[in-house]
Amino acid sequence: MRIGLSTTTIEPALTQGKIDGIGVYTRALLQGLPEHGCDVTGFAYPPPAGAGNGGDIRFTSGQPMAHSYPASTLLDLFTPDSRRKKMPVDLFHATDYRIIRMDCPVVATLHDAIPLKYPHWCSPRLRRLKNMLLQRAAKNADHVIAVSEYAVAELVECFGIDQRNITVVHNGVGQEWLAAPEPAAVSGTLLEYGLRAGYYLFVGTLQPRKNVERILAAYRQLPPAIRAERQLVIVGHAGWQCDDLVRQLRAAQQQGENVLWLDNVGDSARLRQLYAGAGAFVFPSLYEGFGIPVAEAFAAGVPVITSNTTSLPEVSQGAALEIDPLSVADIGAAMQALAQDDALRARCIEGGRKRAATLSWETTASRTADVYRRFL
């Protein structure tokens, strides 16, 4: 099968080397699909005209599309239905929301419905127009992949997709996460960042739905002895509506509160080393279509605290401490429990490893290739 794969989310020239969850997903498919009978070619949208050196950008993961996504969307809107983008593939897989009409079948992964269901978590600039275009783009997909069972109902509700045209394929975790990093490498990374093993760790883009403010508030309410022993480490670049949080994190660091914000850990090996040094992973997100960091923490052998809402219980399957993400007290109680109860920690670590063994990118690639075959 000749498969086109959208690689806009993993081109370093477009992402400045910062890979989000959709980028992790895209990269895993690009690497894994060839093992399952797919001849994969990546395609990335260049920046719009006038947005810097768009014409000079060199792509490393795929070929450039002829037009930027905004320009392609305009062509899609104002040309007859019979005009479709010609593609040299049997099927195109859009791994993000950049979906246009093509002369081949289009499979699209819709990770969530956040812009439509929770617009207050997104930029207000041209929000109504963007959401209208997003809904229209979704209708260009001939088949949709959802990354969790939880997401299906929201995709049906918000995008008007026929549930019969949706297949659930869970995200995964790379095999490299199941192997413990070299202790010397872990020690070197911790020394570089001024960390002591056993810290509380969060990984994710700083934005309102990630709920980092409540993590910080819960940490500040822990007994002084625990805070003195265990740092709070926040890993993730600044996203939308996080100015106040960034100020809080910087102030906490300057005031010696044992809080550290690492905004640019782009190397995946170093990220695994940071997981390996953690004593607990704290991820009380308000909304996730899947929640890849939870699976990564499970594989890394770190006990996990996560939310009892949205897709996260589906991902956790009881292997994490599931708490009310709106309750600072609940988050803090779970953090304190993992610091003081060794038996609880051991149960969470064992349960997490078992759950991680059932979530692999190899399985994701295999089931995605099956979707292609069934559809074609």
Image (tube, rainbow, N blue to C red):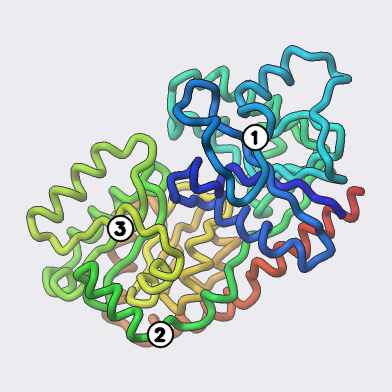
In this orientation, which residue lies closer to the viewer: 337 or 183? 183
Which residue occupies 59% across, 75% down?
175
Q: Secondary structure at mark 2?
A: loop
Q: Residues within 10 Å of mark 3 (few under 14, many from 20)?
A: many
Determine the image quadrant of residue 336: bottom left
Q: Position of residue 186 (x, y in %)?
A: 34, 79
Q: Residue at x 57, y 30 (%)?
A: 116
Q: Earlier in the sequence, mark 3 or mark 2?
A: 2
- Which amino acid, mark 1? Arg
Q: Amino acid at mark 2?
A: Glu
Q: Which residue reaches farthest front?
A: 56
Q: Which residue is mark 2?
A: 182
Question: Which label's residue is closer to the chain start, 2 or 1?
Answer: 1
Front-most of residues 205 and 286: 205
What's the CA distance linking mark 3 and mark 1?
30 Å
Residue extending farthest to the left is 255
The three-letter amino acid code for the residue at tag 3 is Ile
> Which numbered disc covers residue 98?
1
Label 3 sits on residue: 234
Residue 302 in percent (x, y) is at 42, 76
Image-based side of 140 in relation to 233, left or right: right
Give the alpha-carbon distance from disc 2 to disc 1, as whole Å: 39 Å
Lower sequence index among marks 3 and 1 = 1
Residue shown at 73% from the left, 54% from the top: 168
Is disc 3 placed on a helix, strand or loop? strand
Image-based side of 148 in relation to 280, left or right: right
